[in-house]
Image: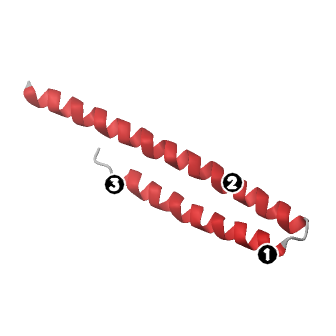
């Protein structure tokens, strides 16, 4: 019986961590999408340097999305 309680506690912790990482992933996705839109807007208005810099932020966010996805995939089932 003790093992069942331990497993339930472990599953609850895993679920909490999954939700936290999922929330982070969602926030990063939203930020990434906003950088894409802002990059296009800046390019359209002729602000090349600013659009290039915002594009770089998008690249960093894309890496952060990949890393957070990796973190989620490495959680124990």
Q: Residue furthest right?
A: 45
Q: Residues within 10 Å of mark 2 (few under 14, many from 20)?
A: some
Residue hosting label 2 = 33
Percent across and percent down for residue 29 are 60, 51
Res. 49 mark: 1
Instruction: Indicate left or right for 68 with 40 as reference.
Output: left
SS under mark 1: helix
Please state which of residues 3 and 44 is positioned toward the viewer in this rendering. Answer: 44
Percent across and percent down for residue 17 are 37, 42
Q: Is residue 37 above or below residue 4?
A: below
Query: Mark 1 and 2 residues: CB-CB less than 8 Å, in contact?
Result: no
Q: Residues within 10 Å of mark 3 (few under 14, many from 20)?
A: few
Q: Residue furthest top?
A: 1
**Residue displayed at 31% across by 40% down:** 14
The quarter of the rendered structure image containing the N terminus is: top left
**Residue displayed at 58% across by 61% down:** 61
Q: Quadrant of residue 38?
A: bottom right
The quarter of the rendered structure image containing the C terminus is: top left
N-term mark: 1 or 2? 2
Res. 58 mark: none
Residue hosting label 3 = 74
N-term mark: 3 or 1? 1
How far apart are the alpha carbons under marks 1 and 2?
19 Å
Percent across and percent down for residue 50 are 78, 70
N-term mark: 3 or 2? 2
SS under mark 3: loop
Q: Is residue 51 above or below residue 68?
A: below
Please state which of residues 68 and 1 is positioned toward the viewer in this rendering. Answer: 68
Q: Residue furthest left?
A: 1
């Amino acid at each position: 019986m003790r093992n069942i309680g331990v497993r339930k506690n472990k599953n609850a912790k895993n679920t909490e961590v999954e939700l936290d990482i999922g929330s982070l992933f969602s926030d990063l996705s939203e930020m990434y999408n906003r950088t894409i839109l802002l990059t296009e807007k800046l390019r359209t208005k002729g602000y090349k340097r600013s659009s290039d810099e915002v594009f770089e932020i998008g690249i960093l966010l894309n890496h952060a999305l990949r890393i957070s996805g990796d973190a989620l995939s490495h959680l124990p089932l």
